[in-house]
Image: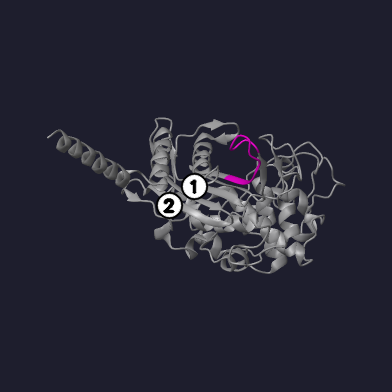
Amino acid sequence: MYFKQISKIIAALFIAAGVFACTAPTKEEKVKEELKSIMEQNKAIGLAVAVVKDGQIVYTNSLGYKDLENKIELQDNDIFRIASISKSFTATSIMQLVEQGKINLEGDVSDYLGFKVRNPKYPDVPITVRMLLSHSSSLNDSQGYFTLNVINPDSSATWQNAYNDYEPGTKYEYCNLGYNTLGTILERVSGERFDKYIVSHILDPLEVYGGYEVASLDSTLFVKIYEMLPDSTFEWQPEAYAKRTEEIANYRFGYSTPIFSPTGGMKISARDLAKVMTMHMNYGTGANGAKIIDEQSSKLMQSNIISPTDEGDAYGFAMRITEQLIPGLKLTGHTGGAYGVYTSMFFDPEQKWGIVTMTNGIEYKRENNFVVFQRQVNECLYNNFIKDATL
């Protein structure tokens, strides 16, 4: 009798162990729960992420809602307006034309635009393409940045106000106007409309879906963007995907380019942005073998052109070099924020890993010059998939 009881107990223990083994969470399930917890802490509406390791995408996930009102869940192929990470597409395109000898980094932007661009306090100092790329041109956004009229002496009586007091090339100030100007230069030099150039010379070769022109994209994939109001409710921001139909109908080639927002208007999924990030990680060559820019150009984009930035980091060409996102790690990339969307794309080109994050609405909090939500999501993904982790 005693032996039978012992046998039953042992059998029960084996059964319990088997059940436990069957129900133990996988790494993906564990990460999903951690991400959900971070979302709850930050009141996030939706989150899309992608992780690259050894040059390959090893993890993607989409949580929460792409449409809060209709409770439509976010999917991996849904596309966000990614805000200022868009600058990296503009800078990459400029470097393509530099390699072709069509643009000179030290060239006077006046020569490319067809009107004089000068800081009135330093009329003899040319503002160069390099300065625009590195946010060191002395231009500012005080007059707005969706039209070049603000810096065209023939179109604005207050053009002088678009410049800071310091000499061009000597200091950093983040400037959206500078990148919309670069997009215009790209258009004038290449002979292709800005949005179409990006698709044909970057997106298509990398086999990714996205673009700057809203009307050319599948609107059912757009992730609705929300901004948190003072009462902690969220308000949808439809302007993020405005079609600009009338403006495009009256488009002035080589001047109206800011309509497409080269500084912040790219729409793309987290998974496809990770493919673009991999190209930068591989110094100009995509995982599919497509060569977008030369290694020398890519490394220049990721170098310390001017520092310190407003956040105390170094800056290249549409690339920020920081040690503040994940403590103890030196990473290269960019963030984006507009209308309530917050995005990040950071990578280690030597170790060949990187992380993309996108959210369409959160409670905005900052820490160490990054959005808290971005820091927490990046640390979660790094700890689970990169740091001492095997898939």
Q: Measuring from the top left, give residue 19's x and y in whole percent.
A: 27, 44
Q: Is residue 198 magenta?
A: no
Q: Residue at x 72, y 45 (%)?
A: 159
**Hey, which quadrant is residue 64 in on the image?**
top left
Q: Measuring from the top left, give residue 345's x and y in whole percent.
A: 57, 48
Q: Is residue 166 left or right of residue 357?
A: right
On residue 223, the disc is 2
Q: Of 1 and 304, which appears nearest the observer?
A: 1
Q: Residue at x 38, y 47 (%)?
A: 26
Q: Measuring from the top left, give residue 288's x and y in whole percent.
A: 58, 66
Mark pair 2, 1: CA separation = 10 Å
Q: Is residue 148 visible?
A: no
Mark 1 packing: few (<14 Cα in 10 Å), some, or many (20+)? many
| Mark 2, secondary structure of its residue | loop
Q: Residue at x 74, y 48 (%)?
A: 303
Amino acid under label 2? Val
Circle count: 2
On residue 243, the disc is none
Q: Of 364 and 298, which appears nearest the observer?
A: 298
Q: Of 57 and 306, which appears nearest the observer?
A: 57
Residue at which label 1 appears: 358
Q: Measuring from the top left, give residue 30's x and y in whole percent.
A: 40, 42
Q: Residue at x 44, y 41 (%)?
A: 361
Q: Is residue 136 visible?
A: yes
**What colouring does the structure picture have?**
one colour
Mark 2 packing: few (<14 Cα in 10 Å), some, or many (20+)? many
The magenta-colored residue range is 323-335
Front tag of 2 and 1 = 1
Magenta segment's dominant SS is loop
- Residue sitting at the far right: 124
Contact? badges 2 and 1 (CB < 8 Å):
yes
